[in-house]
Image (tube, grey):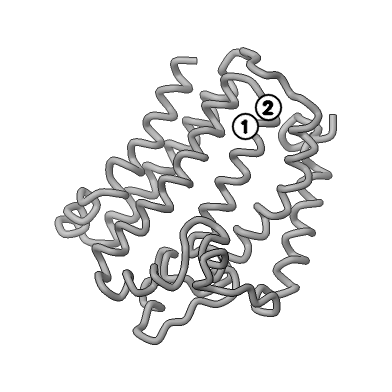
Amino acid sequence: MFLLILASLFFLGIHFGIAATSVRDRLIERFGPLPYRIGFAASALFGLIFLVYAWRQAPLVPLWGSPAIFRYLAVALMPLAFFLVIAGLTTKNPTRLGQESTLTDDFEPTGILRITRNPVLWGIALWAALHLLANGDLAATIFFGTFLILAVKGSFDLDRKRLRQFGERWRHYMAQTSNVPFLAVLQGKQRLVWQELGWWRLILALVLYFGFLHGHARLFGVAPLG
């Protein structure tokens, strides 16, 4: 279990200790944007491989077990996680790497951005939370908890990073949207426009979801429905 904890700390450390702080800015100033991105991507990939390896080696220490209700909850809500990720990756979004230039003075949030300005991270957070509950053992709690912490805290850190980059422009964008899903809608700052979400995104999310559901046991050794 020590190896898994070490892998989790390393993975979180490179994101929260470098990418989410002014250390990132200093490294970019010293080495340039491209070398920094290559170096960070290599470190993150190593951290991910290390984390998966450590999880597979960890002993099984049951906590709350695997109640059927949590498995069914995961099966029911995972399509939403798929949709958040797909919609986030296929919508012009200034929070995404390489799309910062889309934040012009007249930028208007549409589609999934009306729901949350960080859809990919919240999709990952939902995936992690559902799998953490459905597994119910110590190793899974550490493994999926790592991604849950990374996604949730990372969404707030991303706002702070963009605020340093864009200042008032980003503050104006934050005033129109919300980080937490649906909060801007509940506050009356945004409204849901279902047509903007795109039926093709929903269909793609469902196709990918059912594909993973069908092959889950073969790919990961666990049948979601038991």
Along the horizontal axis of the image, is 41 left or right of 92? left
Q: Residue 106: x, y in percent?
A: 39, 86
Q: Position of residue 155 (x, y in %)?
A: 43, 53
The residue that label 2 is drawn on is: 135
- Furthest toward the front, the residue is 187
Q: Answer with left or right where residue 178 lies relative to residue 33.
A: right
Q: Position of residue 179 (x, y in %)?
A: 46, 59
Residue drawn at 75 percent across, 29 percent down: 221
Picture quarter with the C terminus: top right
* Horizontal arrangement in the rendering, residue 95 relative to residue 133 (left or right): left
Q: Residue at x 15, y 56 (%)?
A: 30
Asked whether disc 1 touches disc 2, contact meaning CB atoms under 8 Å apart, the reply is yes
Residue at 50 percent of width and 74 percent of height: 92
Q: Quadrant of residue 167?
A: bottom left
Distance Cα–Cα, label 1 vs label 2: 6 Å
Helix, strand or loop under label 2: helix
Say if 99 sits above or below 3 in the image.
below
Q: Amino acid at mark 1?
A: Leu
Q: Which residue is mark 1?
A: 132
